[in-house]
Amino acid sequence: MSIRPVASQSRAHPTMEGAGVHLHRAFGFGDPSKMDPFLLFDDFRGDRPADYMAGFPWHPHRGIETITYVLAGSVDHGDSLGNRGTLKGGDVQWMTAGSGILHQEMPKGNAKGQMHGFQLWANLPSHLKMTKPRYQDVRGSDIPEITDDDGTTVKVITGSFWGKTGPVDGIAADPLYLDVFVPAGRRKRFAIDTRRNAFAYVFDGAGRFADAANPKGVLLEKEVAGEEMNIRDLSGNRTLVEFGKGDEVTVQAGPEGIRFLLVAGAPIQEPVAWHGPIVMNTRAELETAMRELRNGTFIKPAH
C-alpha cells in the first residue's frame, strides 16, 4: 500500500451565495482540472437564521450533479418538474441536473436555530450532459454506518467501503463519499482507488494527515495529551486537504478526535466551459444554454 501524500491544504473562505446565504467555500470557480470530476464544494452552517434564511431561490443547473448533505436543520426544495421535498439532518440529495432544471433550496434551522450542510458539485461527461434530470433523495436512516473496534465510525453515502455500499447509485464519476469520525489519538488508514482524485474536508476536531514530511502522520505523545499543541500543524475546522496519488489516506486524530468528509471520484478529463450553475464542454454549448434560458426553452420535455 502507498500513502497518498498531502498535495495541498487550505482553509475554506467565507463567501455569500443565493439571496444572501453566508457560507464557506473550500473550492470552486478555479481550475476545473485540479479536482476533476468535482467542481465546487460549499460548507453552509450557522446559528443565526439571518445568515441563511434567504436561501437559494429559483436558479438553473445544466451539465452537472449537485450533492447536498444536511447535518443540522433542514432544506426545503422544489423544482420545475414538480418535485418537492425536505432534507433533514442526516439526509442526502443527489441531483443529476443533466439537460436542465430550475430549482430552489431554502434552509431552515433546528430548534436552536442551527443549520449545517454541505453541497458538492460533480461534473458530467459530455455524453451525459443532456441526460434526463434525476433525483435521489436518501434518508439518513438508510445510510449505512460502520463502527470499527477502536470507535472509528464511517457513514457510506456512496461507493463501497469496509463491506458496505452506500444507497446513492448510478453516478457518472463512480464516487466514494464518506463521513468519517476518528477518535482522539487514533491513527487510521482508508483505502482509496489510486485512479481517483481525492480530498478530505475537516469540519470538526483536528488531526494530521500523512505527507512526505511526516509519512506516518504521527502526533507526539504530549500532543495527544493536549500539551504544547501547535494547532497550526493540524488540519482543523473548515480545512480542505487535497491528496496526491496513492492507494490509501492515513490520518492521525488530535486530542478531540477528527471528523471529515472523504471524497474521491474518477476524473473525466474533458474540456470545461463554465458559467455559474451551468457547465458544458464548449463555449458554443454554454451560449446555447444561456440563449435557451432567455427564450424559455431551457427545460426539455420528458423523454
Image (spheres, grey):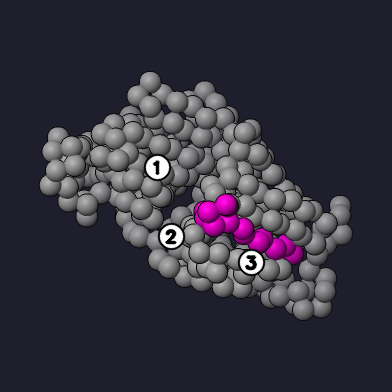
Establish if 264 lies above or below 189: below
Q: Residue at x 46, y 67 (%)?
A: 30
Residue 220 shows up from this direction: no
Mark pair 3, 2: CA separation: 19 Å
**Residue at which label 1 appears:** 259
Report whether 94 appears left or right of 100: left
Amino acid residing under circle 2: Ala
Q: Is residue 289 above or below residue 101?
A: below
Q: Residue 281, relative to residue 213: is it above or below?
A: below
Mark 1 or mark 2: which comes first in sequence? 2
Please state the extent of the stretch shown in magenta in the rendering.
Answer: 102-119
How crowded pointer 1 is (Cα within 10 Å; few <14, some 14-19, many 20+) is rated as: many
Residue 113 at what x, y percent from top left?
A: 54, 57
Earlier in the chain: of badge 3 and badge 1, it is 3
Name the mark nearer the viewer: 3 or 2: 3
Residue 177 highlighted magenta (yes or no): no
Q: Is residue 219 left or right of residue 195?
A: left
Mark 3 is surrounded, within 10 Å at the Cα level, by few (under 14), some (14 to 19) or many (20 or more) other residues, namely some
User: From this viewpoint, is residue 176 visible?
Assistant: yes
Q: CA distance from mark 3 to mark 1?
A: 27 Å
**Residue corresponding to mark 2:** 26
In three-dimensional space, the C-alpha distance between marks 1 and 2, rounded to whole angstroms, equals 16 Å
Q: Which residue is mark 3?
A: 56
The residue under the point 78% across, 68% down is 298
SS assignment for the magenta stretch, majority: strand
Quick one: quadrant of the N terminus?
top left
Amino acid at dot 3: Phe
